[in-house]
Amino acid sequence: MAEQSLFKLKDGWNLEIPEIDENQIVNYGSNLLCGNGYLAYRGTLEEWGKDQYKACIVSDTYDMADGKWRELSNAPDGLYSRISIDGQDFAHDPGSLDLKTELNFNYRYGIFERQTQSNREERNYQILSARFASYDNLHLIANQYTVSGTEKAEVLKFKIGIDGDVWDLNGTHLKNFSSDYDSEKNILYIKAETVEEEIEVVTALSFKINSQLQNIAVEEKEKAIFLIIEVNNPDQKEIRIERNLIIYSSNDRKDPLKQALEDAENCLEFSYEELLKKHKAKWDQRWERADIKLKGNLMDQLAVRFNLYHNIIATPTHSEYLPIGARGLSCQAYQGAAFWDQEIFNLPMFMYTDLESAKNILKYRYHTLDGAREKAADLGYDGAFYAWISGKSGKELCPSFFFKDVISGRKIRNHFNDWQIHVSPDISYSIWKYYLAADDIDFISKYGAEILFEIARFIHSRVHFNSYKDQYELIRLLGPDEYHENVDNNAFSNYQSQFALKIALYFYFKLQNEKPQELKKIVDKIDLKENEITAWQEIKEKIYLPKPDSESKLIEQFDGYFDLEDTTAEVLEDRLIDKSEYWGWPNGVAVFTQVIKQADVIQLFTLHDLFSEDVIAANYDYYEKRTQHGSSLSPSQYAIVAARLGRSEEAYRYFKKSAYIDLKSSNKAVSGGTFIGGVHTAAAGGIWQVLINGFAGMKLKKEGLFFKPNLTEEWEELEWKLIYKQAKLKLKLTQSEFEVNSDKANAKEIEFKVFNKKYNIEPGEKIKISL
Amino acid sequence: MAEQSLFKLKDGWNLEIPEIDENQIVNYGSNLLCGNGYLAYRGTLEEWGKDQYKACIVSDTYDMADGKWRELSNAPDGLYSRISIDGQDFAHDPGSLDLKTELNFNYRYGIFERQTQSNREERNYQILSARFASYDNLHLIANQYTVSGTEKAEVLKFKIGIDGDVWDLNGTHLKNFSSDYDSEKNILYIKAETVEEEIEVVTALSFKINSQLQNIAVEEKEKAIFLIIEVNNPDQKEIRIERNLIIYSSNDRKDPLKQALEDAENCLEFSYEELLKKHKAKWDQRWERADIKLKGNLMDQLAVRFNLYHNIIATPTHSEYLPIGARGLSCQAYQGAAFWDQEIFNLPMFMYTDLESAKNILKYRYHTLDGAREKAADLGYDGAFYAWISGKSGKELCPSFFFKDVISGRKIRNHFNDWQIHVSPDISYSIWKYYLAADDIDFISKYGAEILFEIARFIHSRVHFNSYKDQYELIRLLGPDEYHENVDNNAFSNYQSQFALKIALYFYFKLQNEKPQELKKIVDKIDLKENEITAWQEIKEKIYLPKPDSESKLIEQFDGYFDLEDTTAEVLEDRLIDKSEYWGWPNGVAVFTQVIKQADVIQLFTLHDLFSEDVIAANYDYYEKRTQHGSSLSPSQYAIVAARLGRSEEAYRYFKKSAYIDLKSSNKAVSGGTFIGGVHTAAAGGIWQVLINGFAGMKLKKEGLFFKPNLTEEWEELEWKLIYKQAKLKLKLTQSEFEVNSDKANAKEIEFKVFNKKYNIEPGEKIKISL
Ligand SMILES: [Ca+2]
Ligand SMILES: [Ca+2]
C-alpha cells in the first residue's frame, strides 16, 4: 500500500513522515492541518510561501474577488520565518538537497511538528518547530520555533513577521493593508480588508525569544511587515522563538485590531507549554465522547482518528451561523461553503457525541432560511430551497456556469444550483434524525418546524401533478449522481421529498396537539394556510416513488435510466478526448450511459429502512458495477450498505477507499494548474457512519435504536460512545460479543434492539450480548 | 441583385440561364427540378452523374441504409446519355471549355430544356434536350434528346441506358440489381431492391430514334445497363431520341416490373409532343385555380410561380398516404419526410385552391395516427404525439443524436423528436382551418375528429399541473425556435396546445349534437371516456398562457427568456469557434442568449387573431432584432406580420428574403461536403401566405373571412383565386381597389369582410371596393 512509503506509524494518534516527499507538499498542507473550526493553518513549513500552498483560512470571511466565486479569505501568514546563519540561508526550500525534514502530526491535539537538519556535517544545525491552532482560544495559533546546533555560528539572522502576499484560488481577497510593530510589547500586526465585502482581517503576532537581541530591524512592505532579528555569538544550545499568532475579523469583533492586540499581549503571559496545556484539556473533553477505539489494525485506527479529527476541525462548533465547508477550512476550494454533505455526512457524528454542536449545525439552516426563501422565490417557487453551495447568508453561491468544456474552452451551464433540489429535504431528514436521537422537541418548536414547513412548501411548489397518471412528479432534477442532469423522478430526490412532507406533517400535528401556541407562532410568522397542509398530505400520498421491479428488484435511478447505454467507467475512460474533461452535462462521456458518479439509489438504503435485504442486494450488485466513485461521498455509502448486507470484504474495501482518500492522497489535488484538493470532510464524516451505521449496523428509527453488528474480520474490537435520548452509552463490539454500558449518571432506562431482540439498559448497567 | 447575373427573364413563366455557371450546378439540380409529387428528376444534364448531384427521387421508397437516417431512395438514372462523334466525346462535363450550354425552365409545365453547342467552329454540333415529369402519368419522365449539326460527321455513337450507380446522401439504398434489354420492343430496364425494406424499384426505358441504326451493343454491369447505338453516315439534319423513363416500386404495384414495361411500351405509341400535350392539359387545370398573377415586377411574378410550382410538385396530391417532404422530392435531405411545415406552410395553398389535395394532406395524418400513438406510448404519453420527422408510417424518423459537435467530434443529443411537441397541436390547428375553409363536417367525422381527440389526449398526458400556481404547464419543450431546447411554457406551444383542446372539445360537442352516431363510433373505437372530456376542459381553462406584459406589451417566448443575454446574431457570429458549429443545444453560441433561430412568438400572430396591433407591433420590433432567420420558415412569417402591420417596405423585404431563398441560392447547398440543399418547400408554401394572408390581409376565423389589404407599393396588381365554402372566387387587388368575383356556378351567396365592413356576394356577382 502506498501509505507505507509515505508515513510511519508510532501509535494510533501520531503520523510520522520521515522525510518530505516534494510531490506530496500539496497533500501535507491539508492532511497535516492545524484547525479548530474557526481557522485552520495548512501543514507547511514556516519558510514556505504560497507556491507551497501555504494558507491560513479563516471562517466567516466570505468574499468575491473574481466576480464568480465567493470563497473564504486566507489571512496573512504570521508564521513566516527565514533564518540565515553566518550569512547563509538555512531553509528547507523545495528542491534543496542539503536538508532533511521529518514531519509529525498528532491527531489527538492537532499538533504539527517539523524537525529539519542539515545533511552536511559542517552545518549541523536543526530547526524544530511545533504548532497548534488553539482549541482554547480559537483565534490563536501558537508556535514554538527552535534553532539548535548553532553554537559555533557567529551571526544568526531571523526574518519573522506577517506576510500578506497569500495564496488565493480565485482572485486576491485582501486590500488596503496597514501594519505596525510595537517594539516594547513585541507585537506586530497587519490589518487588511477584503476586496468585496470589506471585512477587516487582522493578523497580530506576539513573540518571545530566549536570547539577547543584538538588533531588530523592521521591514514594512505594501502587504507585509517583517522583523530582522540578529543574534550575535549565540553560544546557546538553542534559540527559541515562541509566537502567538492571533486572527480576528470584523465579523468577530467590532474592533478586531484592538481584540487581536489584546489577545496577543495576553498570550505573552503564558509559555507555549502553558498554552498547549489549556488547548489539550479542551481536546481531551472532545475526544472523551468522540473517539472510536479500534483494535486489530493500527493504521486503520490512525485513519479513523484522522477522519474524526478532520470532521471536528472542519466544523464551526463555536457558532450557529456558519456552515461546514466541503473542504472544511483546509483551503478555499468549494468556497468554504456547505453542501448537502453538511447534514448527511458531517452531522451524524455530532448528533450522537455532541448535541450542542449538532444543534449549531442545524441552527445554521434556521439562520439561513431567508437565503433559501430568496432562492426559491428567485426561481419561482415557494418556501425554502436551500442553496447548493451555502455560505454565511444562505444565498446561493453556486455559479450557474460551473465547469468549463476543456475541448472548446466554452463555459458549461451546470445546474447544481437550480435542479439539485434534494438538499432541502435532506435537511428535513436530518432534523428528524436529530429529533429522534436527542428527543428534543424544543428544538423542533423553536427552529426545526419552521425549516420543515418552509421545505414542505418548497416541495409543494416544485412538484407537478400528472393528472393522466394521477401522480405528483418531480421534473428536471439532478440527483446525488451529478453526471445525469435534467432527469425526472430521481428516486433519491422523490423519496427524500416525500419523507420531508411526512416529517413536516408529523410535527405540524404533534405541535398542534402538544404545543399549540408555539405552532400558532410559527403559522402566523410564515402565514401558513390550512390548505397548504391539505396539499402536503395529498402530495405525500400521490408523489411517484420508483418501486423495485417485481422481478429484477431494481429501483430505477430516474425515469429512463435503464434505457441508457449500459457500460462501465473503464470503457468511458477510453472515450475521453481530454483526460480532464467533465464526464457529465451537457455532453460528457457519462451522460448517455448508466455510469454514475456516486451512490444515488444506494444512498437511499443508508438513510431509510424501506426495502427488503434482497432488494438492497440486487440494487447494490447492479449499481456498484456502474459507479465511478467520482465523488468522495460515494465509497462510505457503499461501505455501509455492504456491511449491512454482511459483505465483510466489500465493506472493508470501501471503508479503506473512503478512510484513506486524503491520507493516501489518491485523488489529485492539483489538476491542470487548478487546485481541487483539500480535505474531503464528507468522507471524514462518512467514516463515523461506516463504523457505527455500517459495521455496528446501527439504525435509528421512530420505533427505536437498532443494532445489527457486522464487524469486519480485519478488526478485533471497536469501542465507541453515543449520546442517545440524552443518555450516555459506551459500546464495544468484538467478533463474538456486543457490549453496551449505560453511564450511571443517566436519568433513565434506555431501550434498544440487537438483531431485533429488545434490550432495556438501566443507568450504570452493562449488557453483554453474544453474537 | 445576384439573380440578374444568374438568369434571364423572358416572361413570368420561363427562367433562362444563358450559360451554365459550374458553381451553381448543385442549385440548378433543385431549382430546375421536373416533378409531379410522385417523383422528381433533378435539373442536371443527361451526361452528368452523381458528382453533379443528379438524382431521381421517388416517393414512398423510405429505406435506411446507414442505421440512422431513413430517407427516400433515388431511382437508377434512365436518362443517362453520352455521345461520341467520330470517336470524340461530345459532352458538357464540368470543367470543359469547349461547350456552351443554355438552360431554360418553364414553371408552368415543369419543362427542363438544355441547348448545348460547341465553341469551336469545326465541331458545330448541338444537343437540344427537353424533359418533363408527366403530370398525366406520374410514373413517366419523357425526354426528347436531339443532336444536330452532325451532317458532316461519319460515326455517331450514343451510349444511353440506365445507370444504377446513383447519388445517395446516407448510404447506398439499392441492391440486387437485375436488368434486361428487349431488342424487339426497344425497352430496357433495371430492377433493384432497397437494402433495408427490400422495396423493389424498377426503372424501365423505352425509346425511339429517328434514324437507321447501324448497330446496337448491350453493355450490362452490376448496377447498370447501357446500349451503344451506332449511327453511320448520318447525313441527317438531326438525330432525335425520344425516351420514356418509367418508374414503379413495389409500394405502387405488386409487380412493378410488369407495370413499368407495360407503361414503357404504351408510351411508344405516342410521340413526345403527344405526351407533352396530355401533360400540359393537366397542368392547365392545376394553374386554373392555383396561379397568382402579379403585375409590376416580372421577376417577382416569376419568383412567385417558382414557389407555387415547387409547393405543388413537392406534394403527393395523388396519395393520401404520403407526406410532403421538407425538401420535397428535390433530394434526400430531410429524409423526404414531413415536418410541421406540411400543415403550417405547405397546406394553406391547397386548402383554398384544391380541396381534394388538401384533404389528402390531412388524411395522411389520419393514416399515420398509429405511428403517432406509438411515439406517444414509447415516451410514456397517451394519444397521438406526431413524429417530428414523419415518413409513410408516421413513426418517428428523427434520430436522437441529430447534430454533431464539430469541435469535439462528439454527437449531440438534440431533442427535436421528444420535446418539440407543437407538431401535434399544429395539425389540430390545420384541421380547424380546413374545416372553416371547406365547410366540410364529413371530413371531421370521418377523419378529423379522431385525430383531434387523440391529440387532445396527448396534451392531457403531456401537461403538468402546478397546484402552487393553480395552472397547467408544459415543461421541457422545444418551440419553433430550435436554439432553445429544454424550455418551459413556450408561448407558441402553450397557445397551440390550448387551441387544440378547444377544437377537440368544439367538435366533440358538435358531433354529439349533430352526428351522435358518428361520434359514438369514434368514442368506441378509441375508448374515449367522459372524464377525459372533463380533463380537457379543465386544462383548456387553466393552461398557462404567457400574456403580453402590461407595460412593454411583450410576450415572453418561454419562462426566463427575458433573463437571457440580450445580444444579436452578428455578435454571436464572432463567438463561433468553428463556422459550421450548431448554434443551439447543448452549448452553442445562442443557447444562453435571446438570439432565436426563427419566428416563434411572431408566428403566433400569423396563426391567431388574439392580440391587439400594438402588442403585435411591440413584439415584432423586439423579436425581429433577435431573429437570426437560421430557418427558411422564418422570413415568410415576418413578411406576413409586417404586411398586416402596414409596414410595406419591411414586408416586401421579407417577401424577397423568402421568395428568393432558392432562386438566389442564398443558402449554402453543400457545407463541409454534406449536402444540405434542395428546395425549401416550406418557404415555397409560405409565399402563398405572404401574398394572400400578408399583402391581401386575409384571415379565416370562425366568424368568417376577413380581408385587410396592404399591397406593397412595389406591385400594381395581384390576382388570385380561392375556393371558400365550396364557392369559387376570383380576387384582384390593386393599390386603389379590391375586386371580388363570385363564379356564376357557385351554389350560394358568400359573406366576407373587408376592413371589417361586411359584404355579401351572389353567384356571378362582382364587388369592387375602393381602398
Ligand atoms: Ca505602519
Ligand atoms: Ca439481364
Image (spheres, coloured by chain):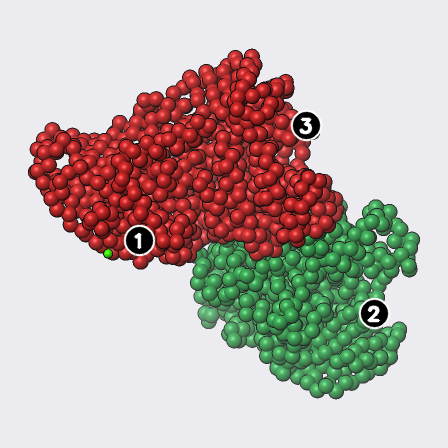
Chain colours: A green, B red
Which of the two marks, 3 or 2, is nearer to us in this view? 3
**Ligand 1 closer than 8 Å to the CB at disc 2?**
no
Local secondary structure at mark 3 = loop
Q: Mark 1 sits on what residue?
A: B191
Q: CA distance from mark 3 to mark 2?
A: 60 Å
Front residue of this view, candidates A570 and B108: B108
Residue B472 in the image: state x and y as whole percent. 69, 45
Front residue of this view, candidates B351 and B648: B351
Task: Tell me if mark 2 has few (under 14), some (14-19) or many (20+) residues whose alpha carbon lies within 10 angstroms of its own.
Answer: some
Q: Chain of mark 3?
A: B
Residue A721 in the image: state x and y as whole percent. 76, 74
What's the amino acid at mark 3?
A: Glu
Front residue of this view, candidates A51 and A59: A59
What's the amino acid at mark 1?
A: Lys
Q: Chain of mark 1?
A: B
Q: Mark 2 sits on what residue?
A: A725
Local secondary structure at mark 1 = strand
Local secondary structure at mark 2 = loop
Q: Mark 3 sits on what residue?
A: B551
Eyeballing the image, is B113 above or below A370?
above
For the residues tagged 1 and 2, is the chain the same? no
State the image quarter where residue B291 is shown: top left
Q: Residue at x 64, y 31 (%)?
A: B702
The reply, left or right, for residue B248 in relation to residue A128 is: left
The reply, left or right, for residue A546 in relation to residue B49 is: right
Q: CA distance from mark 1 to mark 3?
A: 67 Å
Task: Tell me if mark 1 has few (under 14), some (14-19) or many (20+) residues whose alpha carbon lies within 10 angstroms of its own.
Answer: many
Eyeballing the image, is B220 above or below A349?
above
Disc marking residue B424: none
Viewport quadrant of the C terminus of chain B: top right
Q: Residue at x 58, y 68 (%)?
A: A623
Q: Chain of mark 2?
A: A
